[in-house]
Image (spheres, rainbow, N blue to C red):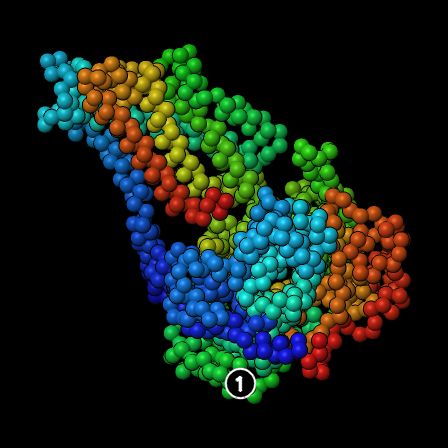
Amino acid sequence: MSEMNEKANATRTVLDVRDLTVTYNTENGPLDTVRRASLKIAAGEIYGLVGESGSGKTTLARAIVRYLPGNGRIKGGPVMLGEDNLLKLSRAEMRRIWGKRITMVHQDPAAAVNPTIPVGEQIAEMARTHLHMNKKEAREKALEMLNKVRMPDPEAVYRRYAHQLSGGMLQRVLIATALTTNPELLIMDEPTTALDVTTEAVILDLIHELLSEFNTAILYITHNLGVVARICHRVGVVYAGELMEEGTINQVFKESLHPYTRGLLGCVPRIDYNKRTIALSAIPGYIPRPDRLPAGCIFAPRCDMAEEDCRRARPPVVEAAPGHRTACRRFEELAGVPLSASLLRRTREPRERREGPLVLEARNIKKYFTMAGSIFSRGPAVVRAVDDISVRVRGGFTMGIVGESGCGKTTLARCIAGLEEATAGEIELEGQILPRSAAKRPPELLKKIQMVFQNPDASLNPQHPVGLSVARPLILLRNLPAKEIDKRVRELFQAVNLPEDYIHRLPHELSGGEKQRVAIARAFAAEPALMLCDEPISSLDVSVQASLMNLLVELQESKGVSYLFISHDLAAVSHLSDWIAVVYLGRLWEVGSAEDVFAPPYHPYTEALLSAIPIPDPDVKQKRVRLKGSVPSAMQIPPGCRFHTRCPRKWGEICEKEEPPWQDAGNYHRICCHIPLEELQRMQGEGSIYQADQAKGGA
Amino acid sequence: MAESSSMEKEQGKKQSRFLAAVRRLRSYPTTVIGFAIVFFFIFIAVFGPWLAPYSYTEQRLSEKLQPPSEKYLFGTDQFGRDIFSRIIVGSRDVLTVAGSATVVAVLLGLTLGLFSGYFGGILDEVLMRLMDVILSIPPLLLAMVILFSLGPSRLNVILVVGFLYIPMVARVVRSVVLDLKTRQFVEAARLRGESSAYIVFKEILPNVLPHLAVEASMRFSYAIFLVASLGFLGLGVQPPSPDWGLMVGEARTWFHQARWVLFFPAGAIALLVVGVGFMSDGLRRMLLPGGVSDV
């Protein structure tokens, strides 16, 4: 019976968008930001809309619900929701559809909840407005919804305010709110992008489970291919405002018929590939601006398959296989080429691993911040951001530091750089003990540690030509004559693959990836021994990320510099690093070579991280290890093992009482846990956490 | 040859950016009006003596309190002086006194704000509390007290008004500096061992200037108002000079007989203040697009 229902529903189209074009009236005239987009979503289906920033995916979603800013206009259509053409409805009729038949979940949960109303009341309000319930019924409905999103202790959560809940809990509240009216269409716009990877995994599981219960059609917008592969049934790939390819997950991820999709997939680093053997296949160039679109295929300027015809006229969208549409005129040639690593990734000669001398040894670094506290709190609170961390980096190698937001990884880097004065600990660089504060370090020591920052917009002075930013370290630290400086700046621009005439440009004339290249050139100008890379690629698009990672690897090989690479992105860290350290709540939990850290036995936290990261391959199934609750505050660190409150493999009372010991797994691989290594190994099983699932239709 | 073509391109780009800015201005009529008003007043301030049909001191008691006519465009006052001429000549006083006061406030406020914000610590604490003290007293009251003791004169008005607006400028500059100094380009400068002077003047100051320009224009419009108020109270420039505030003050007595005596100087003050306000909004839009936090 239920099976029959499912079958009937699977064919019921909820949303049918045809030929939708969105135009914004701007100061420079009208701009078509989305062009001729068509898509269909059935009940109980998750449709992933994936694309890089500025590709128009959010605009498309907003156009579908007719919620555009004042200067936005819609052309084409219709947009059918069930039997109704949304484009023909009046404003008043749309208001009855918003919140009732279509709901939305946004990226930033904290901004989407009213901070002055208890979260439960906000869900109840949905029920009162759209389901016409009275106060008591609405309250019961809200509690029921909180239960459905697996909220622990719904009664208590009902009365809480937004600031009392973590990001993951708030996102659950928003999902509960959005599902209260049992909408036909739910639009989720990057719902997990603001969350940590372990929380993201829990939310994605939840979305998956709720789908069978609610039978809603979901339009899931994201830039993350791994997330799409994990939860979506069908996917549309958007590029510069146009749908490039559309099909089922397997069609798009396994038999992709568009060079852009193939390029994107090749850009994503994977845990199972390493820089020593494989270079990422970056897509050259940048996304065209909507006012400067190329005449032919919009991807042609960046496509290595493009020929004369591609540049002349827009290619038609062709249905290559049932449900598989592509906007590439040469898709037939792609059909024969298997989408395997060999096609997309350049393989590298495996680099010999030399044992370099010790470049950095940071011993027992601590950094405590004192918070003044509000007038309600008792005295000042101490935030133990970094609490006794020791790391070593060897010459020419990369030490990857991985951890979720707020774990203290950035503070650690800032302490090593001397931007923050460590509360305690010793920093030794090439055998010399460094003063803790950068202001006290002499220039010859100062230049040896340079940093590349996360935000490319803030890392260059907006009023200085970028050439000056690169020249300053040469003037100051290396004391070169003017002629020599000019030559070196040009060399550095070449080294980071920027045209020389960029030297006179101001930062705002550069794209995010280009700015980050300048920042890298600036750091290299000082000829450092150690580069601290603090999430240098996190704010960039996937295709740009890949080219920057390749650049970092090339520069390391040619200049022999060591990196301390900090990121929350486990895949990026694993791709670039020789050694990896896992940080949680200001402490290290596991250190070892990249291969050792990603093979059992792992620390339970590492295990959870590995299990959580979304992999852009629908065939890869991960063992499911999920963390409970949220990260404790660094002001109230749990006693005993700091991880015990969330540990999925808690050993016993000892975890709550005693600090765990460091255990040596051999080959410099060390794990800080109470559980004996043999026992961990037994729990976690042999082999990788990833099982390539050969059998079709595996759960 | 390649050089020249790239130069041309650069030139073309600059020109097109200028044209784009002008085109954008068209969609903000208030900005255009604001700039027009301000430039108009600057023009008459510079060329006033040649433009004015009569001398501003020439009294014709037989023709006192004449309504506006062809002969006396804005009418005459209680001494039979031509109000039109007095307003034209008086614009120079308003602009120089308020302008100089603004310059005093901006220069001192910028210095205090830069140092207070960049170095922080006890210096910052002391300076900012001092600023709070000045801010806590109503400016007109404080100005009156100081001018009573110093005696009214043009220089004293400039110094007092300038002094009163230091805290506002200093606070704005300080908050911008506090934001800028945690930016990563400043941290990168620290990591290559730049001196504090380089960081303050080369890295931070250029990024403060757009904010300072907007703040200065706002202070200017406030200064015009305060200078006029002091003139009205008789604490500014002394008769018979054609200070607009003073003219309004003197006109109070004759208001019932001759409204124009009050209306034209008061209208001139209002027009200039509104004009500077519009200009200030326009400057903000041009120099600080995307809000204050976006440096």
Q: Quadrant of the C terminus of chain A?
A: bottom right
Reading the image, the residue beneath label 1 is: A321
Q: Quadrant of the N terminus of chain A?
A: bottom right
- The image quarter containing residue A371 is top right
Name which residue lies at 56% across and 88% down. Answer: A336
Name which residue lies at 88% across and 49% down. Answer: A657
Closer to the camera in the image, B211 or A613: A613
What residue type is disc 1 on?
Ala
| Residue A639: x %, y % from top left | 83, 47
| Residue A636: x %, y % from top left | 76, 44
Provide the chain ID for the residue under circle 1: A
Q: Secondary structure at mark 1?
A: strand
Name which residue lies at 86% across and 54% down. Answer: A655
- The image quarter containing residue A623 is bottom right
| Residue A610: x %, y % from top left | 73, 66
Q: Is residue A309 above or below residue A355?
A: below
Q: Is residue A216 left or right of residue B22?
A: right
On the question of residue B178 being in view, the answer is yes
On the question of residue A56 being in view, the answer is no
